[in-house]
Image (cartoon, grey):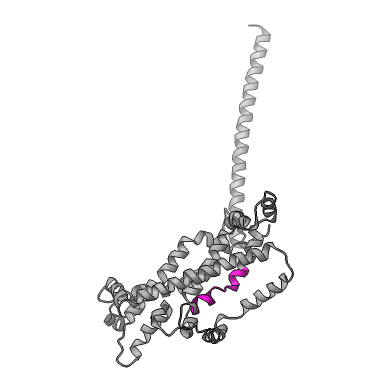
């Protein structure tokens, strides 16, 4: 074997050793890097937990905020739990057992049946009356709020600022302060003790109008409307085919506010209506509640509680089904682009 061959083999062995050493050094460096990353992440988590800094991967946890939210949840759910428990009791159990404890007899289905058959099924009439007031009154208020808010947001006309001031002022006036003037006005028109005494006042929703004004201004780009007009679309076609789909979250939010306000309306029907056949659920259930205090009246608190439970079911269903649109509608304008 020549000296050149030996030298070449020695150089090749040295090169392999060097490559092996470099590979080992690289693995060691990578291991050290991973250790540093893990150490930095651990330090970051400790710092975030201490200082309250939060991000998506490391959310902030506040014990005080958790306690406050839990107390608020209990406060909101307590009336529903009370209704649910006491709706299962008979009248005897209702007056003789603890309010948050079940009675000796489970009478929920019997109570529901009795609610719809008591006094010749007047509860069903009250329920249909309430649905009528909500569909016509709240539905009309939502439609007027949509069209009015859209017009105020997308069209410029003299007196627009004055209209805005009137709307803001109307929002600040409580509805109960207008009930008596409305009663005097409707009495002059001979509309008291009729469904119109409930429907016509329900058609006005200043808060819904303001909400749709703000939402329309942000949700419907002016450039989109101009493009539709250039393409030959009229104002009504632009509104119904272009703007209306973009306003869906705001429409649902406004509809929910008006529906709840009309469904739970108490003082207005109290002074407007005398005929029990036109009572909504709020007045009808209150009449049942006061029945025991009248001469010869029968105490039916179990039916009042069961009727109240039935009354809130449609609202719960509406909120759960429309929750996605409602949340996005409330969040509109929360982030500045």
Q: Position of residue 87 (x, y in %)?
A: 33, 75
Q: Which residues are magenta?
A: 197-210
Closest to the observer: 19 or 149? 149
Quadrant (top left/top right/bottom left/bottom right) for the C terminus: bottom right
Magenta region includes residue 285 = no
Closest to the observer: 159 or 310? 159
Q: Position of residue 26 (x, y in %)?
A: 62, 34
Q: Residue furthest front?
A: 189
Give the number of marks: 0
Residue found 46% across the figure and 77% down from its top: 195
Q: Residue furthest right?
A: 158
**Principal SS element in the magenta part?**
helix
Q: Residue furthest left?
A: 105
Left or right? Give the position of 215 relative to 321.
Answer: right
Magenta region includes residue 206 = yes
Considering only vertical position in the picture, is 210 above or below 239? below
Left or right? Give the position of 199 relative to 221.
Answer: left
Query: Splitting the image into 4 quarters, where does residue 33 fall?
Result: top right
Considering only vertical position in the picture, is 7 above or below 138? above
Q: Position of residue 53 (x, y in %)?
A: 62, 60
Q: Position of residue 323 (x, y in %)?
A: 50, 61
Q: Is residue 70 visible?
A: no
Q: Residue furthest bottom?
A: 295
Considering only vertical position in the picture, is 98 above or below 58? below
Query: Splitting the image into 4 quarters, where does residue 9 fall?
Result: top right
Residue found 29% across the figure and 91% down from its top: 296
Left or right? Give the position of 145 relative to 276.
Answer: right
Q: Is residue 169 visible?
A: yes
Quadrant (top left/top right/bottom left/bottom right) for the N terminus: top right
Closest to the observer: 218 or 144? 144
């Amino acid at each position: 074997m020549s000296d050149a061959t030996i030298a070449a083999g020695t150089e090749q062995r040295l090169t392999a050793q060097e490559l092996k050493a470099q590979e080992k050094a690289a693995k060691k460096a990578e291991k050290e890097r991973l250790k540093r990353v893990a150490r930095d992440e651990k330090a970051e988590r400790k710092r975030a937990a201490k200082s309250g800094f939060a991000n998506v991967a490391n959310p902030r946890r506040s014990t005080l905020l958790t306690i406050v939210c839990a107390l608020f949840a209990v406060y909101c759910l307590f009336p529903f739990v009370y209704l649910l428990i006491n709706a299962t009791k008979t009248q005897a159990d209702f007056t003789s057992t603890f309010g948050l404890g079940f009675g000796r007899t489970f009478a929920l289905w019997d109570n529901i049946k009795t609610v719809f058959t008591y006094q010749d099924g007047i509860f069903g009439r009250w329920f249909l009356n309430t649905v009528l007031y909500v569909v016509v009154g709240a539905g009309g208020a939502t439609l007027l709020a949509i069209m009015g808010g859209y017009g105020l947001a997308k069209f410029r006309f003299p007196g627009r600022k004055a209209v805005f001031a009137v709307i803001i002022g109307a929002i600040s006036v409580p509805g109960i302060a207008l009930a008596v003037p409305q009663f005097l006005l409707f009495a002059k028109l001979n509309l008291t003790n009729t469904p119109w005494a409930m429907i016509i006042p329900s058609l006005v929703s200043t808060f819904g109008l303001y909400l749709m004004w703000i939402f329309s201004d942000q949700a419907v780009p002016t450039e989109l409307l101009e493009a539709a007009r250039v393409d030959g679309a009229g104002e009504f076609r632009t509104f119904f085919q272009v703007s209306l789909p973009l306003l869906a979250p705001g429409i649902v939010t406004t509809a929910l506010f008006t529906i709840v306000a009309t469904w739970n309306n108490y003082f207005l029907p109290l002074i407007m209506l005398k005929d029990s056949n036109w009572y909504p659920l709020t007045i009808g259930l209150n009449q049942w509640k006061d029945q025991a205090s009248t001469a010869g009246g029968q105490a039916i608190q179990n039916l009042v509680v069961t009727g109240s439970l039935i009354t809130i079911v449609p609202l719960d269903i509406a909120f759960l089904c429309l929750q996605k649109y409602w949340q996005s509608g409330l969040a509109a304008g929360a982030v500045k682009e």
